[in-house]
Amino acid sequence: MKDISREDELEAEIASDCFAEQLEIGEREALLCKITDNMVDLVMMIKTSAEITYVSPSCRKVLGCRPEHLLGKSWLDLIHPEDQPKFLATIENARAARLPIKWEYRARHAEGHYLWLESVGNPLTVEVGGGYIVSTRDISYRKRSEEALQESEKKYSSLFNSMQEGFVLWETVYDSAGEPDDYRFLNVNPAFEKILQVKKGEIIGRLLSETSLGFENYWLDSFAQVARTGQPYNYEGYNRTIQCYLETFIFTPGDNLLAALFIDVTRRKMVEKQLEREREWMTVTMGSIGEGVIATDVSGKVLLMNRVASDLLGWPEAKAIGRYLGELLNTVDDINRSFYTEPLQRIAQAEEKIEFSGNTISIVRNGGRRILSNSAASIRDTDGQIIGTVMIIRDVTEKIKNEAKIKRLSYVDKLTGLYNRAYVDRILADEEITSQLPFSLIMGDIDGLKLTNDVFGHQAGDNLLVNIAKVIRGCCRESDIMARWGGDEFLMILPHTSEKAALRICERIASTCAEMEADPIELHIALGTATRTSLEQGMDVLFTLAEEDMYEHKMQQSKGFRQAILSKLEKDLWNRSHDTEEHTRILSKMAMEIGATLGLDSYERDKLALLASLHDIGKVALPENIMLKKGKLEPEEQEIMKKHTEIGYRMAEAIPELRSIAEAILAHHEQWDGSGYPRGLKGTEIPLISRIIHFVDVYDDMTYNHNEQAIIDPQLAIKELAKGSGVQFDPEIVQAFLQSVIE
């Protein structure tokens, strides 16, 4: 912002002083009354007998009745019967010592129900009539929030970590007499660490007595009282260790548990002490409010600004005095950008206080944006002439952000970042959106998700979903609505989109998937479209058409996609092991010759040929350092290697073309005597084609140079294999091998 010259500052200060001098005592009181009348909190003057002698207009908002209905009545009559003893005790204790009072209680609303209220009372001198000036606010929302916090700590952990109040959860430790004796730290939030100036890791698991957090005896007595009675309690106190005032709310969230909220109210206390040097009425009133207060003269220059407004807007009071209100607020209103164009004229036209609906966005002095809730009114002299304005502002930035965050989380798929089905249901129920003709839908179904989950694990399956979501997001437009419709299904909602444009999007998605690197398998999604060109066409019909189109494409493409997966898996097997295509061909030839000798029919021979090529397919999911290791595997590596039969079985079950050999893949390392793995099958319990592959695989391992080691002479290998007849191998297969291969 542009700095003003010293001359301008002096002129502003002189103008301000002149205005202040013009105010007579009555006018100053009128200003104070106007501020009080425009506060959100309920301000009352109560005699020591509890008789009400003054009530601010905000009584309507807090208790639902007109001020005159309370004048002359006893405040005790409105307090809940259960809370009256505490109220009387508080008054009695404070009366003798002439101390401020503060308490929470339930009071009856004009409509008959009870509200939770918080009152702060400061004693008045005898010269002004004695009694107390009391500032009261509705804290029902805070009470409900305390209960909600206890029930939803895990669900709203992000809110727990970002809340400004310090939170601590203790386990209550009792002495031999069953009385609360100490408190063990279970959890604290970042705000607690900041306020109490302690690290979480230094206190979790420790007793409160083992720390030096500065909780004196009166704090510990309050903790014990809540732990003993279960009744929540709140108070303010000074912590000498960290040298700050803390407002504390204590409650019991469960058996043997004690929780507390801490709010650093040091700044507010400093403001209160500063205001104590002013007139008593000003001190009590301004010290009891939590909103920002700004008062201006008739030209809009600031005359008064409290500390809350100063902190909120980033303007020290000394620099703010004499500047125009619009300069301090620097408002950009999303709803009505002329919000502050003529503030004085708008306020002057109103007989009562104006409460602006909605929220305004102000760019504060440090450049940050704050969302403010505002109310304003004119200040008039005894003749009814406008002499200025008073504005109450409240920072609702975090509240709005948290509400938006919670709303967003409820409508977004956590894994992919796309919208979820709940959001889609909401959008499709909005006729303003679905009537934007032409209106198109694209439905998509991922191929290979079950295979990926079963073989490579759910993390790999999640990666597949994330990658396809990235493709969809990159191929669609900003105006399109993209959602994860189900487990492996996606939905794109395209208002103002023709069938031709929707098909172009489908083509972009398909081509982008084809360009993506396999991770762990190639991306492929079957897509179907449908377009609404008339409002007579129902949305359920549109969904049916898109779904039918999607399944038709899936039927056409799935077989080719699975064949491509099989080819890739086979090549990956050759790349990740010591086998080669030539070796696979030789192995298959030997197996088929044995099968012919044993008289296998054509169906079994086809299965045998498929098994010869893919019996070790499960190895593609094993670590490369084990698959490509030269030399003998360590015992733990051997156990990992054995898992390839079970992985291969799951892969075969997930691919229709391999389902017929799934059991054979699982059993191709079983042995005739039952000493094999993974199930210890023996004899004819083992599928015949598994027995054949097991035999030729062992023969191949003995005679084929996998690890650049010396090849065993085939004749010697045959003799060794013959020794395993009836033990490791099916005797009939050994004999068939000797007849078919050797001869």
Image (tube, grey):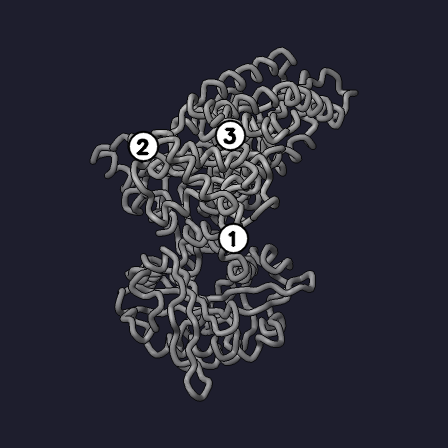
**SS label for mark 2:** loop
Q: At x 57% / y 45%, what residue is drawn?
A: 352
x then y, percent, for residue 289: 44, 57
Instruction: State the residue in front, 398 or 57.
Output: 398
In terms of sequence position, does the residue under pointer 3 or pointer 1 come before the other? 1
Most extreme residue toward the bottom, as rendered? 177
Real-space Cα separation, disc 2 to disc 1, in angstroms: 55 Å
Q: At x 51% / y 65%, what residue is drawn?
A: 118
**SS label for mark 3:** helix
Residue matched to label 2: 707
Q: Nearer the viewer, mark 2 or mark 3?
A: 2
Most extreme residue toward the right, as rendered? 536
In terms of sequence position, does the residue under pointer 2 or pointer 3 come before the other? 3
Is residue 602 found left or right of 265 in the rendered image? right
Most extreme residue toward the left, as rendered? 6
Real-space Cα separation, disc 2 to disc 3, in angstroms: 21 Å
Q: Residues within 10 Å of mark 1 (few under 14, many from 20)?
A: few
Q: Disc 1 residue type? A: Lys
Residue matched to label 3: 614
The answer, for residue 349, to whether it is visible in the render is no
Q: Disc 3 residue type? A: Leu
Whether residue 251 is situated above or below residue 653 in the rendered picture: below
Quarter holding residue 495: top right
x then y, percent, for residue 199: 29, 60
Residue matched to label 1: 155
Instruction: State the residue in front, 646 or 546.
Output: 646
